[in-house]
Image (cartoon, grey):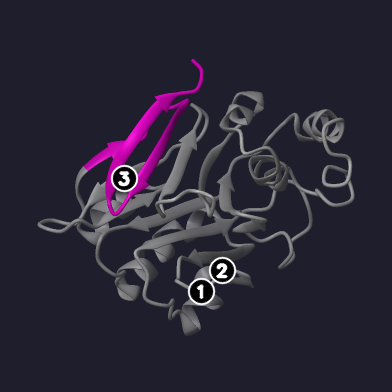
């Protein structure tokens, strides 16, 4: 079990609110914490640290001004506890984080290796989460989501998209919720719905399972069912 959180809005993030949301998701994962913040730079701003958020990233949490943010608290299931294995992961144009355990990830590596052996091998992709984001980057095909077996909630950014938006998808085995700050365009996303209540969100809802959402500036601009 890991914690996912994210932010999307027309306005800039509040570091204090994001820090609180991180802390409220810490109980879901204390092995590492990390985040991605969208900036105008061609180089993605990704920060990771080992240990619980409160004893690592929280000590100097100061993300750059951004209106698109992805955060993660890890409880290791597959793979060692290391900075390399801390989320979010960056593969080419795709940056994302995952909550869950992919039971068929080794089979997926073998399957995708037939299409691109240079990228998909067991040495490069040593944990289950990496396989999904590597595949999303390599094949630019969201139908890959239908290959997942096991538990998954995913949030990622694809730099190939003309608009800077969040992609959000989950299945029935992992929760993911969203809510809004009153009288603002600020959308917050969290594995813990109680965390959204705690930071003051209203109109809190669940993301529907097996549905791919694309979120831009705090608005769901598209959603489509991937499978039932």
Residue 127's spot in the image, x, y percent? 76, 47
Residue 211's spot in the image, x, y percent? 43, 28
Q: Earlier in the sequence, mark 3 or mark 2?
A: 2
Instruction: Please give the name of the residue rendered at 45% of the width and 79% of the height, measured from the top-left corner.
Output: 61
Q: Is residue 149 visible?
A: no
- In magenta segment, residue 20: no
Find the distance from the CA under tag 3 to the CA under tag 2.
24 Å
Displayed quadrant of residue 108: top right
What secondary structure prevails in the magenta region? strand
Residue closest to the far front? 162
Q: Earlier in the sequence, mark 1 or mark 3?
A: 1
Residue 16's spot in the image, x, y percent? 32, 75
| Disc ID at residue 27 | none
| Disc ID at residue 44 | 2
Of 179 and 80, nearer the camera is: 179
Find the distance from the CA under tag 2 to the CA under tag 1.
7 Å
Find the distance from the CA under tag 1 to the CA under tag 3.
28 Å
Displayed quadrant of residue 92: bottom right
**Element under disc 1:** loop
**Residue for badge 3:** 178
**Residue for badge 1:** 41
* Quarter of the figure with the N terminus: top right
Instruction: Please give the name of the residue rendered at 52% of the width and 70% of the height, measured from the top-left corner.
Output: 53
Residue 203's spot in the image, x, y percent? 18, 43
Of 119 and 76, nearer the camera is: 119
Q: Is residue 157 visible?
A: yes
Q: Residues within 10 Å of mark 2 (few under 14, many from 20)?
A: some
Count of numbered circles in the view = 3
- Front: mark 2 or 1: 1
Q: On the rendered structure, is 81 left or right of 5?
A: right
**Element under disc 3:** strand
């Amino acid at each position: 079990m890991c914690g996912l959180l994210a932010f999307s809005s027309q306005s800039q993030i509040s570091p204090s609110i994001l820090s609180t949301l991180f802390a409220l998701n810490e109980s879901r994962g204390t092995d590492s914490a990390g985040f991605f913040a969208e900036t105008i730079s061609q180089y993605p701003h990704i920060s990771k640290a080992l240990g619980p958020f409160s004893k690592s990233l929280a000590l100097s949490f100061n993300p750059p001004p951004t209106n698109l943010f992805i955060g993660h608290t890890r409880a290791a299931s597959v793979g060692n506890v290391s900075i390399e294995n801390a989320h979010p992961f960056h593969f080419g144009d795709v940056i994302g984080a995952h909550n869950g355990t992919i039971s068929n990830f080794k089979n997926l590596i073998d399957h995708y290796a037939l299409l691109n052996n240079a990228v998909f091998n067991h040495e490069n992709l040593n944990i289950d989460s990496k396989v999904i984001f590597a595949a999303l980057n390599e094949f630019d095909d969201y139908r890959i989501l239908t290959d997942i077996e096991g538990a998954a909630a995913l949030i990622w950014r694809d730099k190939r998209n003309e608009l800077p938006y969040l992609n959000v998808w989950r299945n029935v085995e992992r929760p993911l919720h969203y809510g809004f700050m009153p009288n603002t365009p600020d959308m917050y996303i969290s594995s813990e719905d109680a965390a959204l209540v705690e930071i003051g969100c209203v109109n809190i809802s669940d993301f529907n399972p097996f549905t791919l959402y694309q979120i831009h500036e705090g608005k769901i601009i598209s959603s489509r069912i991937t499978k039932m």
